[in-house]
Image (spheres, rainbow, N blue to C red):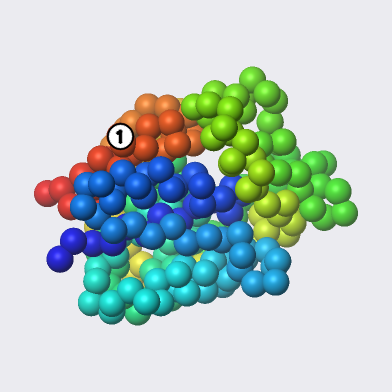
Amino acid sequence: MKPVFVLVHSPSVGPSTWRPVADRLASAGYQARVPSLLRVGEGEPPYWPRVVDAVRDDLGRLPGDVPLVLVGHSNAGLFLPAVRWGLTHRVIGSIFVDAALPARSGPTPAASPEMLDFLHPLAVNGVLPRWTDWWDEADVAPLFPDAATRQTVIIEQPYLPLAYYEQDVPAPDGWDDHRCSYLLFSAAYGELAAEAHDRGWYVAHLPGEHLHQIVDPAGTARHLVELAVGS
């Protein structure tokens, strides 16, 4: 039975960052789900328990015997262990795409002290600007293949509370007892890809910027399949 890919977007952006890849996976004969973390309940921030609930609710009608491959982009990588343990479906793979790595066990801070130092001055009344507003235009423009895609992603972005980045995300013991992989896009995540390699994971490199899945969805989908079902 082919696995279903569960594409979890970064809470800093939205599900449109995964939908082109989901379409390519469907064309290749794989079912893909893209849970939205934008509507986790009455506008509440996507703290980790609500992320788990959002993914579980999205998969509610999926037959219980269908195996899953969890795919997390960017900060969503931290949530994959908790999501895995919150599901009743069998998870056969977890793929981290230009993503933060959870601890082998125990809590993982959602942001490093250095990142928190960067974010604190940006917050107004405890609320941060949209993610793309954190950076200079020279950094943001290369992320997008065209103006229409950029507009879709930017409009969809939430205004997250600073407290979201101050949370600790649990990584239950034994969460990585299945096939784990890392797909590297950008140089900024090179050290994390190297750490994934040191953990004995499968690692692939598709050079690009941090949102490369919307620039090359076909290549991204191909790598996900290879990482999920390769020997």
Q: Is residue 143 above or below residue 100?
A: above
Residue at 28%, 79% (x, y): give it. 64
Tell me the SS state at disc 1: helix
> Residue at label 1?
219
Residue at 53%, 26% (x, y): give it. 146
Image x and y of residue 25, in percent: 29, 48
Q: Is residue 175 above or below residue 192?
A: below
Residue sitting nearer the eye, 211 or 218: 218
On the rendered image, what quadrant is the N terminus found in?
bottom left
Residue sitting nearer the eye, 182 or 113: 182
Residue furthest to the right in view is 125
Residue sitting nearer the eye, 173 or 131: 131
The image quarter in which residue 152 lies: top right
- Evaluate whether residue 198 shows in this view: no
The residue type indicated by label 1 comes to: Gly
The image quarter in which residue 81 lies: bottom left
